[in-house]
Image (cartoon, rainbow, N blue to C red):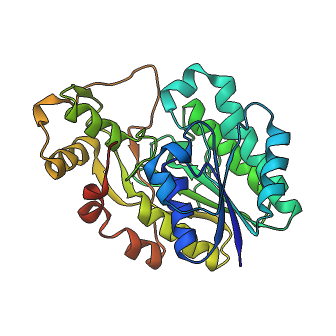
Amino acid sequence: MRRALVVGASGLVGYHVAKELKEKGWWVSGTWKTNDPAKNPLLHAAGLDQWGQIDLAANLRAGIDQMFKAAVPDLVVMCAAFPNVSECERLVMRCHRENRMTPTVVAQAAGALRSQFVFLSSGYIFGGGKSEYTEMDLPGINCDAGNTVYGDDKHHAEVGVMGTCPHALIVRTVGVYGQDPGNKCFSSRLVGSLKAGERFGFDGSSVSNWTWAPDLARDIVELVEERRSGIVHSAGAVQDRKTFALDVVDAFNLDATLLDDAVTDTTVPRPHRCVLRTVRPGAQAIHALSNAHGLLDLEVK
């Protein structure tokens, strides 16, 4: 049986990737840091073969050795990250460690075992100056680079991963939503706030893809089984954030008057437009209906 290690399986994307791999017949080991699968119904129901609590920030090399010794993986999917873009501006060293250094070191370990390696990257590596970005776009070389600490570290991680593991697969995505074990993504926070009768502020004019996590996971697993390598984009429909938020409100019959779509965090230089072009026919088919069927899949605990 093929064996997979999903680093960060307790997070939004990692959970769905691990679940998809299980459904495809893989033996799956997943790691978690603070979101205990034994106490989380979504993670418990995923049916992984093995869970391991790993704090890569505390002891990076020892943590990676522990992961690989327990899993002996044919495939490693690196989903773990510090994805809070605002907090990354404040906690710069943590961002460097978790978003830049860790993926490269995990890629080195995967390469030593000749395991397939997948790294989840972000559209935030770009600055937002183009209407859309292709898989051939390289920040600072043939297009603008992102201005956030998070985006810069993700870009450097891409370079580090490909340098140490040339046959790696890098999957860039943006605007991921869906059932989130940690309730941290934009849509989960929105639903949670409005259900509690609280106001929810955001920049409604920003534009990006919106990517349903199960679609992204299915695309990643199909790419793995095709043994693809290099850089690919996997992202859903393009909408401004206000339109997406109103779709979520309609899906859950929430109070739209609690939305404040004119809140802009000027301390974080996010790209105002972050659109990834996905040209692979298979990926286009997978993501085609994401906003139509994905919103009702949201569940806030």
Identify the residue at horizontal 45%, vertical 19% (top origin). 267
Residue 229 location in percent, x, y?
Answer: 68, 69
Question: From what the image shows, is residue 268 above or below residue 273?
Answer: above
Q: How many marks?
A: 0
- Left or right position of 229 against 190: right
Identify the residue at horizontal 73%, vertical 49% (top origin). 159
Residue 289 location in percent, x, y?
Answer: 29, 69
Q: Quadrant of residue 97?
A: top right
Residue 163 location in percent, x, y?
Answer: 81, 54
Tell me the quarter of the image containing the C terminus. Answer: top left
Residue 262 location in percent, x, y?
Answer: 23, 27
Identify the residue at horizontal 21%, vertical 25% (top origin). 199
- Front-most of 44 and 218? 44
Question: From what the image shows, is residue 43 above or below residue 285?
Answer: above
Does residue 292 appear in this view? yes
- Left or right position of 101 against 45: right
Tell me the quarter of the image containing the N terminus. Answer: bottom right
- Left or right position of 43 against 166: left
- Front-most of 123 and 129? 123
Name the residue furthest front.
38
